[in-house]
Amino acid sequence: MIKRNLVLVGAALTLLVASGCAVAQTSSEEEIGLRKTSLYAEEKTVADTTSYSKAAAGESKLIPRSFENAPPMISHDVEGMLPITRDYNACLDCHVPEIAPTINATSIPPSHYASFRPVAQNVGDQLKYDGKAIDNTSDVISVVHKRESLSGERYVCSSCHAPQSENAPLVENNFTPDFRSKDSIASSNLIDNLNEGL
């Protein structure tokens, strides 16, 4: 009986090792990374030159959003518009809600005219919100303070919005976004969705 069990265990181990060897596959160093060059000669590797749209603002084709409420990509040339400084933001020349519809530009959404930071006060050595003591402002759940002007928290547009490279992707993207409404493909409804418990 013991001899038969040993033979069965030996046969199982042999089958396991043989199947593992059949599945094992080696890859050359050039196949491992995205750049397809030797890992030992990276100093000779030159990435593709990044190519951005040269279309002027107003003449470019809108880039679809990656997902609902995703910051839209900049579809036009940004030469001379960056960096955004405290004294000048070229994006505001076309994208403020009062001007954008007249020149067919994407309008800055209402979420950019709001602050989501709770207004707390230091009273002695205590932090208070709505008269109640709190440990820190992260204890306050959802607070929206609407503003008449663009919120300073979203003044530097290039923190979220960026030009889209026209280079071919290194890895195929199979992601398909799911929009809850046709309107959300081209516009933001974030301010309306903030209290949904997302």
Image (cartoon, rainbow, N blue to C red):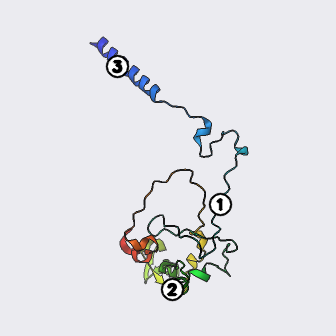
Task: Residue 108: give x, y in percent of width and height.
Answer: 52, 79
Q: Quadrant of residue 13?
A: top left
Q: Is residue 32 left or right of residue 70?
A: right
Question: Which residue is located at x 55 percent, y 70 percent?
Answer: 61
Task: Residue 93: give x, y in percent of width and height.
Answer: 62, 82
Question: Which residue is located at x 54 percent, y 32 percent?
Answer: 26
- The span from disc 3 to disc 1 (Cα, nearest Å) is 60 Å
Q: Secondary structure at mark 2?
A: loop
- Mark 2 and mark 3 in contact? Answer it, CB < 8 Å: no
Task: Residue 156: give x, y in percent of width and height.
Answer: 61, 74
State the residue position of label 3: 9
The residue sitting at the left extreme is: 1
Residue placed most toward the observer, 78 or 58: 58
- The span from disc 2 to disc 3 (Cα, nearest Å) is 74 Å
Mark 3 neighbour class, 10 Å CA radius: few under 14, some 14 to 19, many 20 or more: few
Q: Considering the image in quadrants, where does the N terminus appear?
A: top left
The amino acid on which the numbered mark 1 sits, given as a three-letter code, is: Ser
Question: Which residue is located at x 66 percent, y 79 percent?
Answer: 86
The amino acid on which the numbered mark 2 sits, given as a three-letter code, is: Arg
Q: Considering the image in quadrants, where does the C terminus appear?
A: bottom left
State the residue position of label 1: 51
Label 1 vs label 2, nearer the camera: 1
Mark 2 neighbour class, 10 Å CA radius: few under 14, some 14 to 19, many 20 or more: few
As displayed, is residue 19 above or below residue 43?
A: above
Q: Secondary structure at mark 3?
A: helix
The residue sitting at the front extreme is: 59
State the residue position of label 2: 147
